[in-house]
Image (cartoon, grey):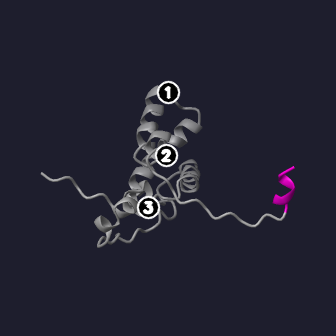
Amino acid sequence: MPARKKPLTLAQLDGSAAKDPQRYRDRAEPKVVPLGAAPSHLTAQERTAWAEFSQEAPWLAESDRALVASACALRAQIQAGEFNAALIRELRMHLTPMGMTPTSRQGLHAPEEPETDDPWAQFDAC
């Protein structure tokens, strides 16, 4: 069975598309819908966790909502002080596919934000 094709976005992030552009020439990316607002069934603490995840991982999309909701429940329990090793392990297992651990982000290189003009930069050289 042949290997699955790497998504174009992942190829752009890990440098594969730049290395072999003709391989990705005719690929189109599906439209990605942002994560959006927290579901109404979440508690107040879980909604706070949702906002934190949205801020910390802006790459999460609508298709990740079930995973994020589950991670929010775990994070809310841990932040409320009801944690044990099993909860922490489970949260870590949720964070990995969400790209929120150092090893899960290791191969991805997000484009750098352009530098803004800093009028005080000339004084930093001293």
Residue at the location (43% across, 43% down)? 104
Position of residue 76 measured from the top left corner of the image (x, y, whole percent): 54, 42
Vertically, is 104 above or below 44?
above
What type is the residue that disc 2 sits on?
A: Met
User: Residue 2 or 46: which is nearer the viewer?
Assistant: 2
Which is more toward the observer, 85 or 95? Answer: 95
Which residue was labeled with disc 3?
Answer: 61
Q: Which residue is drawn at 58% across and 59% down?
A: 112
What element does badge 1 sit on? loop
**Residue 5: percent from left, percent from top:** 25, 58
Question: Which one is in front in this view, the residue at disc 3 or the one at disc 1?
Answer: 3
Q: In this view, does 72 lie above or below 33?
A: above
- Mark positioned earlier in the residue sequence (2 or 3): 3
Distance from the alpha carbon under mark 2 to that under mark 3 = 14 Å
Give the labeled residue for mark 1: 84
Foreground residue, 75 or 5?
Answer: 5
Residue on which the image places disc 2: 100
Q: Which residue is drawn at 57% across and 52% down?
A: 56
Q: Nearer the viewer, mark 2 or mark 1?
A: 2
Q: Position of residue 39 (x, y in %)?
A: 47, 60
> Magenta part of the protein: which range?
120-126
Amino acid type, residue under disc 1 in the picture:
Asn
